Image (spheres, rainbow, N blue to C red):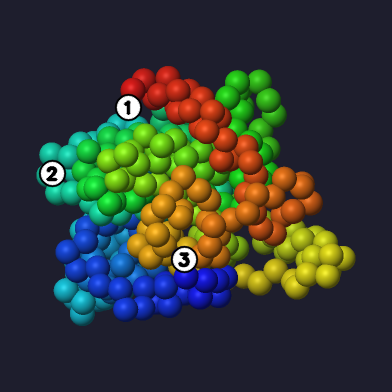
Amino acid sequence: MSTSFGAKSTTDDVLAGVDLKGKRVLVTGVSAGLGVETARALAAHGADVVGAARDLKKAEGATAVVREAAAKSGGSLQLIELDLADLASVRAAADALVADGRAFDLVIANAGVMAPPFGKTVDGFETQFGTNHLGHFVFVNRIASLLKAGARVVSLASAGHRFSDVNLEDPNFETTDYVPFEAYGRSKTANILFAVEFDRRHKERGVRAVAVHPGGIQTELARHLDPAFIQGWIEQLNAQAAAEGQPPIEWKTIPQGAATSVWAGVVAPADAVGGLYCEDCHVAELAEDASQIRAGVRSYALDPAHAQALWALSEKLVGETF
């Protein structure tokens, strides 16, 4: 595998020389940030992109750069409505794609929310678990028949998975106190475990799944957070880094943040990333020490039995078997 890409690589670096004409890809969350850049980069290399968003009007404006890139490359952009916090919307979007019948080479489950006040989805699930995990769980599974042999699913997770493992006994904080970043950690761990189990179920037919951490990026994802809290958190992390002789944290640009998604989805060898967790355009190493907060993946997020248990719980919660 190429080792020429890293934390500072951009989407254009990663896709240099790659021709995606004839490839059909789906990206969720194309109304801002990483989703728009991911769609732009793929469209700029000739891909036919289907962009999913909750707010189509917002997405129309945000994806003007995607349409411009597609026009120059011979690619295309189609927008569809998808509200991951409403399973009726999820099922309607997936069913429409299946009825259309056109296959996909790549699905990037990019959309998500981070650390909002306690709330519930339309279906009564805790907002982050319901949106980040269960919405994508139903959506991707419902369109799995459209994934060609050789296709990949990229599940956007986060270093935030290290905040918390999933809680299979109380996924919706009914008996435990709600802590926004603990809930975020649970949902991001779930995103990794989903990739682990989806990969296990589909790799025999040539479809692989991988989870990725985009890196620390200033996007709309942080809209629920007090800027003072973010600044204090960064200062705390940098103090720890200095004590360990490490450089301070640097925010990634959005093109740098989206690079790992397109690297894992298009460039990296499938067998090298399938069922794993990637960051900075490489496969992450295990990081079990709680003080390791800059890089790496916790073993609980890659545990096959854990992934199967979460899958079974998820099917029970959404009332659907895949």
Residue occupying the far left of the picture: 100
- Image mark for residue 23: none
- Does the residue at mark 3 contact the one at mark 2 (Cβ under 8 Å)? no
Q: Earlier in the sequence, mark 3 or mark 2?
A: 3
Q: Which residue is depicted at the point 65% across and 49% down?
A: 286
In the displayed structure image, the side of residue 147 where residue 84 appears, left or right: right
**Rendering quarter of residue 200:** top left
- Name the amino acid, label 3: Met
Foreground residue among 151 and 184 = 151
Q: Report whether residue 93 is seen.
A: no
Quarter holding the C terminus is top left
Reading the image, the residue beneath label 1 is 322
Q: Secondary structure at mark 2?
A: loop
**Rendering quarter of residue 181:** top right
Q: Is residue 129 above or below residue 45?
A: above
- Image mark for residue 1: 3
Residue 45 appears at what percent x and percent y?
27, 73
Residue density around tag 3, few if under 14, some if 14–19, many if 20 or more, within 10 Å: few
- Image mark for residue 101: 2
Q: Earlier in the sequence, mark 2 or mark 1?
A: 2
Q: CA distance from mark 2 to mark 1?
A: 19 Å
- Does the residue at mark 2 contact the one at mark 1 (Cβ under 8 Å)? no
Foreground residue among 233 and 9 = 9
Q: Earlier in the sequence, mark 3 or mark 1?
A: 3
- Name the amino acid, label 1: Phe
**From the viewer's perspective, is the residue at label 3 or at label 2 nearer?**
3
Q: Which residue is depicted at the point 52% across and 33% down?
A: 304
